[in-house]
Image (cartoon, rainbow, N blue to C red):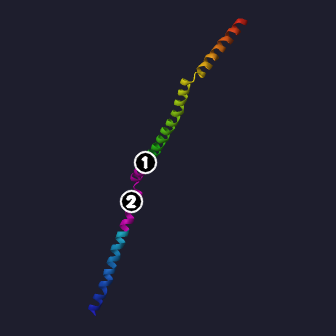
Amino acid sequence: MSERNGSAEKPDLAVLREEIKQTRAELGETVQALAAKADVKARARDQVEQTRQRVLTQAAEFTGRVREAAVRAKEPAADVQTRVRTDPAPALLVAAGLAALVGIILIVRGRR
């Protein structure tokens, strides 16, 4: 009977040892996960890095938009400058406006 009991206990003992080994591995993973959550400095560093990356991405996008807007704004300004240089009408209008202003000032002074 001792052989029977000895051989019958060995598989049960092997199964138990395998279950213990698996439980230890699972427990080790759980402890590591809890330690990671409890590591406030590491979590803060991760959060800072994520925020940094997000800000850098947004800054790059914003810079691109500003550059595009500057190019678009520059094009019409160049068109206006070209029109002013080629069309003497605005210069004539400014001169006429100044002459009218001087005339009004002289009339008002003459009445006093």
- Our reading of the magenta stretch's main secondary structure is helix
What is the magenta range?
A: 27-52
Where is the C terminus found, in terms of image quarters?
top right
Give the residue type at disc 1: Gln
Label 1 Cα crowd, 10 Å radius (few <14 / some 14-19 / many 20+): few
Q: Position of residue 90 (x, y in %)?
A: 60, 22
Name the residue furthest left.
Answer: 3
Q: Is residue 102 left or right of residue 54?
A: right
Tell me the residue at 32%/77% (across/down): 17
Give the residue type at disc 2: Ala
Q: What residue is disc 1 on?
A: 53
Establish if 71 lies above or below 37. Answer: above
Name the residue furthest right.
Answer: 111
Dots 2, 1 in contact, CB < 8 A? no
Tell me the residue at 33%/73% (across/down): 21
Establish if 12 lies above or below 68. Answer: below
Q: In 3D space, how far apart are the residues under numbered discs 2 and 1 (Cα atoms)? A: 25 Å
Residue 87, magenta (yes or no) = no
Label 2 Cα crowd, 10 Å radius (few <14 / some 14-19 / many 20+): few
Is residue 24 visible in the rendered structure shown here? Answer: yes
Callout 1: SS: helix
For the residue pair 40 and 58, the one nearer the viewer reads as 58
Determine which quarter of the picture holds residue 38: bottom left
Is residue 112 visible in the rendered structure shown here? Answer: no
Establish if 29 lies above or below 85. Answer: below
Q: Number of labelled discs?
A: 2
Q: What residue is disc 2 on?
A: 35
Residue 36, magenta (yes or no) = yes
Determine which quarter of the picture holds residue 99: top right
Where is the N terminus found, in terms of image quarters?
bottom left
For the residue pair 83 and 99, the one nearer the viewer reads as 83
Q: Position of residue 35 (x, y in %)?
A: 38, 59
